[in-house]
Amino acid sequence: MTETLSFPGLGLEFNINPVVFQITETWGVKWYGILVTMGFVCGCFYAISQSKKFGLDPDRVLDVLLGVSIGSIVGARAYYVIFSWDTYRNNLSGIFKTWEGGIAIYGGIIAGVLVCIIMCRLRGVKLLPMLDAGLTGVLAGQAIGRWGNFVNMEAFGTNTELPWGMTSPTIMRYLEYNQAHLAAQGIEVDPLLPVHPTFFYESAWCFLGFLLLVWMTKRRRYDGQLALMYAGWYGLGRFGIEGLRTDSLMWGGIRVSQALALLCVIAAAALMAAVHRRAGKSGGFPPLYANTTEGQAIVAGTFYKTKEAKEEAPPEDGEAANTEEPHGMEEGAETQDPGEAPEAPEGLEAVKPEESGENL
């Protein structure tokens, strides 16, 4: 159903239908799904295309990302359901009806990182470089995916007098229906007034963060630095933006995502400080994985082939010689006292180990 989304202060109006085309009376392809999928694909494309800069094999990075995609979907839904349990307590079948809405990006990120750890172990991919590449791509995906909220006219904030405030019949109905509930949280809203386009704030913040991490890729000093910057950057933006929203998941009087965002900022800052302190004491940062012999072999495409060839190769003749007597030690062979120095060749003086001056 087409609806008008307007920005009165800017004199802009958009006629939007969230459904691209209808399949049945109740099923259809929606712009939200297309935009979120586009964001995910773009994020994956970035991580794969840049994988060699991190010392990673593109094919194995793709394997990891396929696993992460499944884990992220499950995690995003689980996070939303957990903190909206009153809605699903008596409607357990509704938990699986994701097409009715209800996912949370933080749940997807948490589950995605956990699955990434498992997949990296299974596929022999170095974890920290994978997180650096993957989370940089996530910011690009988030910047694109947030526009799905624009089409759905959701994820907006409280009233604002700023010129880019927006309104629509859907927004007015939502605020009117939830006005008393929001007032109980100390949030006063007027359904007739424009609201903050918080979806746009987050999209812009994520896009700027993506540009920052792309710029930092060649300037990073240790593996995991970009991942920590992602946690701090996104957490800082989400903390501020979440405070404006009218649809926050709550735990008592606490906005769950806002609290989690603050924890991410604190944790990222503390870990970065600890890494720099340790580097100061040890005289420098460890080499980037991409600059190690193993990382360069992976980029050259020889590391995994050599490793697999060694694992598949049959034992060479004589490899079982550990159980045989070494040459010169056959039964009856003369042995030399270990304390005696070997006889020196003619013209050279034998030196006993203890007299050589070397620390053996």
Image (cartoon, rainbow, N blue to C red):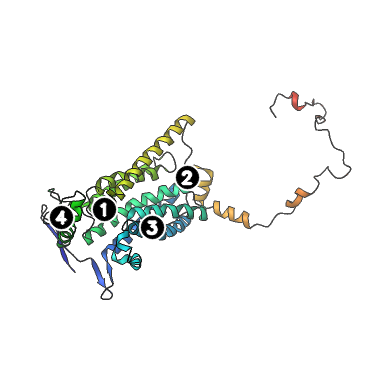
**Front-most of residues 290 and 256:** 256
Q: Please name which of the two marks, 3 or 4, marks the residue nearer to the observer.
A: 3
Residue at image mark 2: 290
Q: Earlier in the sequence, mark 2 or mark 4?
A: 4
Q: What amino acid is at disc 4?
A: Met
Tell me if mark 3 has few (under 14), some (14-19) or many (20+) residues whose alpha carbon lies within 10 angstroms of its own. many
Q: Nearer the viewer, mark 1 or mark 3?
A: 1
**Residue in the foreground of this view, choosing between 318 and 65:** 65
Q: Nearer the viewer, mark 2 or mark 1?
A: 1
Q: Is residue 293 visible?
A: yes
Alpha carbons under labels 2 and 4: distance apart:
46 Å
Q: Is residue 290 left or right of residue 311?
A: left
Q: Bin the neighbour count of mark 2 within 10 Å (Cα to Cα): few under 14, some 14-19, many 20 and up.
A: many
User: Marks 3 and 4, how far apart in space?
Assistant: 31 Å
Q: Which residue is mark 1?
A: 248
- Of circles 2 and 4, the one toward us is 4
Amino acid type assigned to the residue bearing label 3 in the image: Gly
The residue under label 3 is 75
